Image (spheres, helix red, strand yellow):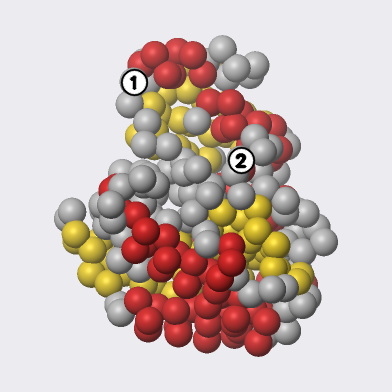
Amino acid sequence: MKIYISVDLEGICGTTHWNEVTRGKEQYQEFQKQTTAEVVAACDGAFEGGASEIVIKDGHDSACNIIAAELPRKTQLIRGWSRHPYMMMQGLDHSFDAAFMIGYHSLAGSDGNPLSHTMSTKIVKITINDYPASEFLINWYTALFEKVPVVFVSGDRMLCDHAAELQPGIETVAVKEGSGDSTINIHPVSACEKITETACKALSLVRPDYLVELPPEFTATVTYSKTQDAYKASFFPGASLISACTVSFAATDYFDLLRFFLFNI
């Protein structure tokens, strides 16, 4: 069984402020280690559940956060950004049996996490077919595009509830929840234990009836914090400026929408 794991940091146990998830800041190394520990925990659960191969995409900021030497030997790690439209799902294809998402976070404008955002802090809001879009939603659609089921996600509680609403039956581990500019966290060791246990359990969802169908067409809006970013994005082929800060783009092929995001977020 071949498993894909996409990893972010803002949904890792304990992360609360930007200096904890930014390379070069004093507090970063503590949470780099916790991120790596949660990824290892997910790998351990996957191998226990029958995985024979795991590919991990470091999907945060520089995409060079996970400590490779601490990963299990039967894994591959994708570091850095190729600039492929799959972005945080780089390397995913239909050969994978299932996907996990570790350290994911609530969407822009929500109060589920002090670090909530969608793709970029310059973005106020993204919608797809009038539904507020998170990074989970964008990347879940990418997995569906490749016919790969996303069976497990960990992160903040609001994100986990959001994922369960979109994909009924998905296994989740909420390692924290937001409260204003603070987070309430479970113990970091407990987070890893729960991730291992749930990742193993999640592989039982790998069956044909679990996959859902992508929508037949997509209309996205991106609202920027600065008018000049919206103005620039409006010149992408097929895009339209619908207000001073908002651009709309429609497509029937999800890959075309991802291409729009790649060049405009």
The mark found on residue 96 in the picture is none
Circle 2/circle 1 CB separation < 8 Å: no
Q: In the picture shown, does residue 231 fall above or below 156?
A: above
Asked if residue 30 lies left or right of residue 247, the reply is left
Q: Quadrant of residue 175?
A: bottom left
- Name the residue at 37% across, 59% down: 29
Q: Quadrant of residue 150?
A: bottom right
- Name the residue at 65% across, 53% down: 78
The residue carrying mark 1 is 226
The kind of residue on which mark 1 rests is Lys
Q: Quadrant of the N terminus?
A: bottom right
- Name the residue at 60% across, 81% down: 44
Answer few, some or many: residues within 10 Å of disc 2's Cα (few below 14, many 20 plus, some between 14 and 19): some
- Looking at the rendered structure, the secondary structure element under dot 1 is loop
Count of numbered circles in the view: 2
Q: Position of residue 116 (x, y in %)?
A: 34, 49
The kind of residue on which mark 2 rests is Trp
Q: In the picture shown, does residue 26 fall above or below 170?
A: above
The mark found on residue 81 in the picture is 2
- Viewer can see residue 167: no
Answer few, some or many: residues within 10 Å of disc 1's Cα (few below 14, many 20 plus, some between 14 and 19): some
Q: Position of residue 225 (x, y in %)?
A: 33, 26
- Name the residue at 46% across, 30% down: 222
Q: Position of residue 192 (x, y in %)?
A: 44, 79
- Viewer can see residue 124: yes
Q: In the picture shown, does residue 81 fall above or below 184?
A: above
